[in-house]
């Protein structure tokens, strides 16, 4: 008799671990579109919500004051040398990256354009709402971890709508197709260019930057598994 509750608890624990196990591929969800302009109210709302929490997550890293995500390092650097706010500089950088698609024969989707506008808006909302942390390491680390979790969740939602990659993702895949260079190497090169340029312009680097680089892939993979479990997959 005593073994039955233990067995049930073990099964529950295994079930939770199975849900949290990082997903290796991007599943097709109930809301996944068939093309980059396959719009429906539900799909667009999921996209916008995902991009919004992505932006809020990015803002938490910025306000942690211990290091930004690589592209926010660049955006912060640009904002320090121009009249642009952090959100505005994020928007301008996204547009510049998008322009690089055209000679590579890559074309945007609705999600690509929404990515630039919504993430920029909610980064600015986030840095306005959340105060900058000052010499409080536990709070800073907590904000970085929550920020990484939100960016992972937001990425999962917008990626699975199938409405087009963000500017950086599209540039990565376009360069890969045109040159044959491995995707990982192309992405590393793009991220390093953004990071170094931002650092030279005065953007904030730190332990938060390193934590983001190490953990964001796992965050997205775990959230893909969670969303697939609860929302169901068409595959």
Image: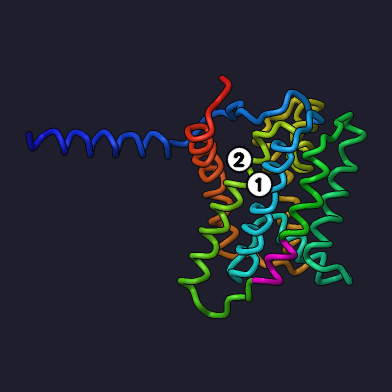
Question: Whole-Å distance between the Cαs marked 2 and 1?
Answer: 7 Å
**Circle 2 residues within 10 Å: few <14, some 14–19, many ≥20:** many
Residue at the disc numbered 1: 50
Q: Report which residue position mark 2 lands on.
A: 156
Residue stretch rendered in magenta on the structure = 123-129
The residue lying furthest to the front in this view is 41
Left/right of residue 94 with respect to residue 162 in the rendered view: right
Badge nearest the viewer, 2 or 1 = 1
Query: Residue at 83% of width from left, 61% of height from top?
Result: 89
Q: Do the residues labelled 2 and 1 touch (CB within 8 Å)?
A: yes
Name the one closer to the observer, 44 or 96: 44
**Could you tell me residue 117's position as x and y percent?**
81, 52
Instruction: Please tell me which residue is depicted at 64% across the width and 35% down the height of the picture.
Output: 184
The number of callouts visible is 2
Farthest residue, direction top: 235
Return the x and y of residue 232 as percentages of the image width and height. Answer: 53, 28
* Residue 85 falls in image quadrant: bottom right
Q: Name the secondary structure under disc 2.
A: helix
Q: Indicate whether 111 appears above or below 83.
A: above
For the C terminus, give its image quadrant.
top right
Q: Does the magenta stretch include residue 4?
A: no
Image location (x, y in percent) of residue 77: 78, 66
């Amino acid at each position: 008799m005593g073994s039955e509750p233990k067995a049930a608890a073990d099964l529950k624990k295994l079930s939770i671990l199975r849900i949290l196990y990082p997903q290796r591929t991007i599943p097709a969800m109930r809301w996944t579109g068939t093309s980059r302009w396959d719009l429906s109210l539900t799909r667009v709302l999921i996209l916008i919500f995902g991009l919004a929490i992505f932006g809020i997550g990015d803002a938490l890293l910025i306000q942690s004051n211990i290091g930004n995500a690589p592209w926010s390092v660049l955006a912060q650097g640009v904002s320090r040398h121009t009249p642009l706010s952090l959100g505005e500089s994020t928007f301008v950088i996204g547009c510049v990256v998008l322009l690089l698609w055209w000679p590579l024969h890559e074309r945007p989707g609705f999600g690509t354009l929404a990515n630039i506008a919504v993430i920029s808006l909610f980064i600015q909302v986030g840095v306005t709402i959340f105060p900058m942390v000052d010499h409080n390491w536990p709070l800073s680390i907590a904000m970085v971890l929550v920020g990484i979790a939100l960016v992972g969740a937001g990425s999962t939602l917008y990626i699975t709508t199938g409405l087009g990659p963000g500017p950086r993702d599209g540039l990565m895949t376009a360069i890969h197709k045109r040159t044959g260079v491995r995707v990982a190497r192309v992405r590393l090169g793009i991220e390093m260019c953004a990071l170094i340029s931002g650092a030279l312009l005065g953007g904030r680097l730190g332990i938060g930057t390193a934590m983001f680089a190490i953990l964001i892939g796992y965050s997205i993979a775990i959230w893909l598994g969670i969303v697939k479990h609860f929302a169901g997959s068409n595959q």
